Image (cartoon, helix red, strand yellow):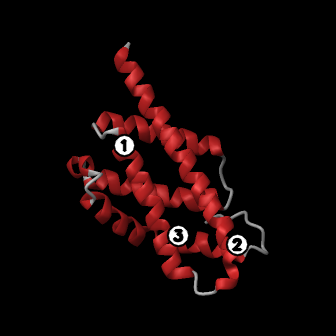
C-alpha cells in the first residue's frame, strides 16, 4: 500500500489515516445501521444493501486518501457527481442523499473521537484534521448536488 503523503511532523494526520484505513469496515457497518434506521433517510431502506455498503466503504477509503492529499478536489467532484446521479436514478430524494453524507461525516468524528483523542494537547492538530474532513464533505455534498441536478435537467429536456 502506498504510504500517505503527510508531513512527518503531523503525527495526528498519520494516526487518523491509519485509524480509518484499519477500521473502515466496522465504521461502515456502524454508519449503515444508522443510515437504514434514521427517520430522515428512509429511501435507503429500499436500496440493495450491498451496493450502499460498498459505496459507503469506498467513501471512507477515499477520505483517508483525501486527508493524506493523495488526490485532488477534482477527483472528489467526479466521484460525488456520480454518486448524485446514481442516487437520483435510485429514486433517493436529494435531501436524503445529503443527510446520508452528513451522517457519514458525523460517524467518522464519533468514531475518531472515541478512538483517538485521549491527549488534549493535540487540539490544534485535531482541529486541522476536522477542517480537512469538513472540506472533503462540503465538496462531496456540492458535487453530489451537481450530479443530481444534472439528472433532473436531463429529464426536463
Q: Which of 145 and 62 is in front in this view?
A: 145
Q: In this view, does 152 lie to the left or right of 122?
A: left
**Element on which disc 1 rests:** helix
Q: Which numbered disc covers residue 125?
A: 2
Indicate the position of residue 8 as horizontal and vertical percent values: 78, 73
Q: Mark 3 points at which residue?
A: 20
Report, in whole angstroms, how far the alpha carbon at label 2 lies from the one at label 1. 32 Å
**Element on which disc 3 rests:** helix
Q: Residues within 10 Å of mark 1 (few under 14, many from 20)?
A: few
Q: In this view, does 36 lie to the left or right of 123?
A: left
Q: Which residue lies furthest to the bottom in this view?
A: 118
Q: Name the residue under label 1.
A: 95
| Residue occupying the point 51% across, 60% down | 61
Relative to 73, say whether 102 is above or below.
below
Q: Which of 16 and 134 is in front in this view?
A: 134
Indicate the position of residue 96 as horizontal and vertical percent values: 34, 46
**Image quarter in which the N terminus is found:** bottom right
| Residue occupying the point 43% across, 41% down | 83
Image quadrant in which you'd find residue 102? bottom left
Mark closest to the chain's N terminus, 2 or 3: 3
Q: Which numbered disc covers residue 50?
A: none
Indicate the position of residue 117 as horizontal and vertical percent values: 58, 81
Amino acid at each position: 500500500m502506498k504510504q500517505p503523503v503527510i508531513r512527518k511532523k503531523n503525527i495526528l494526520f498519520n494516526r487518523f489515516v491509519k485509524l480509518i484505513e484499519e477500521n473502515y469496515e466496522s465504521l461502515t457497518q456502524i454508519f449503515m445501521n444508522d443510515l437504514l434506521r434514521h427517520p430522515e433517510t428512509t429511501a435507503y431502506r429500499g436500496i440493495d444493501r450491498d451496493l450502499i455498503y460498498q459505496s459507503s466503504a469506498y467513501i471512507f477509503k477515499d477520505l483517508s486518501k483525501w486527508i493524506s492529499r493523495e488526490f485532488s478536489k477534482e477527483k472528489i467532484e467526479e466521484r460525488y457527481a456520480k454518486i448524485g446521479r446514481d442516487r437520483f436514478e435510485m429514486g433517493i430524494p436529494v435531501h436524503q442523499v445529503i443527510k446520508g453524507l452528513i451522517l457519514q461525516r458525523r460517524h467518522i468524528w464519533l468514531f475518531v473521537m472515541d478512538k483517538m483523542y485521549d491527549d488534549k494537547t493535540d487540539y490544534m492538530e485535531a482541529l486541522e484534521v476536522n477542517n480537512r474532513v469538513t472540506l472533503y464533505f462540503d465538496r462531496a455534498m456540492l458535487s453530489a448536488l451537481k450530479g443530481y441536478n444534472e439528472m433532473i435537467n436531463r429529464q426536463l429536456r
